[in-house]
Amino acid sequence: MRTLLVSGLLLLAWAAPAQAATCKAPEYPGEGYFTSLTATKVSCSTASRFVVKYYKCRTKTGPTGRCVKRVDGYSCTETRHSIPTEINGKVTCKKGSRRIVHTYQQNT
């Protein structure tokens, strides 16, 4: 009976969805800042390095550019709200069950 109970608890723990970790956002490489960073099934250090790589992809064609390719195998979608002086963006990147979500504010 005890073995069955332990097995059941382990199964529940395994089947539970992974919790997203709230991570400390890295320094923003340009004019602006990262406002949030969360990681699911990825370490915070990996997520932190990743968002800087995504920034470099996004700004390769200029400060208002977009990243249209995979970065480190992650597929990303971005939504933006802009005014003439700034961009506020939310980026969601997925690679299998791994997920990195970050938001940023960039001066234009």
Image (cartoon, grey):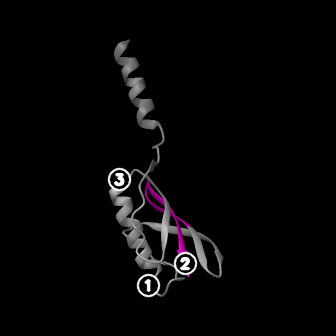
Spatial separation of the CA atoms under disc 1 and disc 3: 26 Å
From what the image shows, is residue 101 above or below residue 105?
above
Assign a secondary structure to mark 3: loop
Asked whether residue 71 is in view, the answer is no
Give x and y (percent) for residue 44. 37, 54
At a point 43% along the width and 84% down the height, the residue shown is 60
Residue 43: image tag: 3
- Let me know if residue 100 is in the magenta part: yes
Mark 1 vs 3, N-terminal side = 3
Locate residue 70: give its quadrant: bottom left
Mark 3 vs 2, N-terminal side = 3
> Which image quarter is the C terminus in?
bottom right
From what the image shows, is residue 10 above or below residue 48?
above
Asked whether residue 106 is in view, the answer is yes
Closer to viewer: mark 3 or mark 2: 2
Residue 107: image tag: 2
Residue 60: image tag: 1
Q: Is residue 79 left or right of residue 22?
A: right
At a point 39% along the width and 67% down the height, the residue shown is 27
- Mark 1–mark 3 contact, CB under 8 Å? no
Q: Which residues are magenta?
A: 90-108
Closer to viewer: mark 1 or mark 2: 2
Give x and y (percent) for residue 17. 48, 41
